[in-house]
Amino acid sequence: MLKILGKSTSINVRKVLWTCEELGLEYQQEDYGSGFAPTDTPDFLALNPNGLVPVLIDEGFVLWESNTICRYLVGKAGRDDLLSSTPRGRARVEKWMDWQATELNSAWRYAFNALVRKNPVYNLQSEIDASIADWNRCITILDNKLQHSGMWVTGQTFTLADIVLGLSVNRWKMTPIDRPAVPAVDAWFARLGQRPAFRRHGDNGTP
């Protein structure tokens, strides 16, 4: 059975849990991270030298980086609907997954640490304001994409791009900031809400 190390409130762990649910996979999840089992022990660092969650263990095969874990699980399950096996189809999905992990994550980091995590290091109002502006800019990019793509991020088929971005938008919606009108994002987020796996792991009340 698959083993997933990481607390279920972590946004990156929830990506993996949601993917497992969509695939109908059985797994054993163990809570690691702040407030749970430590990630700075020699045993854990031997699995992931970054000391971060999630970590996937599949019959002795160890993998970290949440988006990579999701790709691995979908590829192993042969679910071309979630991640195409054609070079162009795969690239359309991975482009948005990589954007989520780079541009979007970089945009929210300062504001989220200041406003939600209440980290005293993040206390410059100018930086908070800049982070919020960049975060909203990124969500507007997603809104423009959804206006043209239709049902889902890359078209008429639900994919891994919707999973990783769905969690990011959940975080954006739950953070106490002023947000622009994004009707296409709102409609897409409502469609996500119809999926049982999203209700369990995506929109579960934890930013």
Image (tube, rainbow, N blue to C red):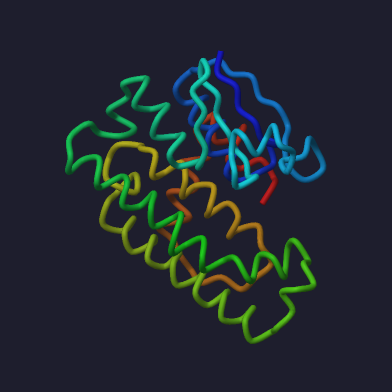
Residue drawn at x 36%, y 37% is 159
Residue in view at x 26 percent, y 57 percent: 148
Q: Position of residue 130 (x, y in %)?
A: 56, 81
- Give the quadrant of residue 26: top right
122 sits left or right of 197 in the view? right
Q: Is residue 107 left or right of residue 44?
A: left
Residue 80 position (above or below residue 42) = above
Q: Position of residue 143 (x, y in %)?
A: 39, 61
Q: Quadrant of the N terminus?
A: top right
Residue 49 rendering spot, x and y as whole percentages = 59, 43
Q: Nearer the viewer, residue 140 or 194?
A: 140
Going by the picture, which residue comes out furthest to the bottom?
126
Q: Nearer the viewer, residue 161 or 127?
A: 127
Query: Is 152 left, or right, of 132 in this rendering?
Result: left
Q: Can you say whether 57 is above or below 153 in the image?
A: above
Of all residues shown, which one is farthest toward the right?
35
- x and y, in percent, of residue 85 in the image: 22, 31
State the residue at coordinates (63%, 71%). 110
Number of dots carrying numbers:
0
Residue at 71% x, 37% y is 42
Query: 183 or 21: nearer the eye?
Result: 21
User: Left or right: 113 with respect to 78?
Assistant: right
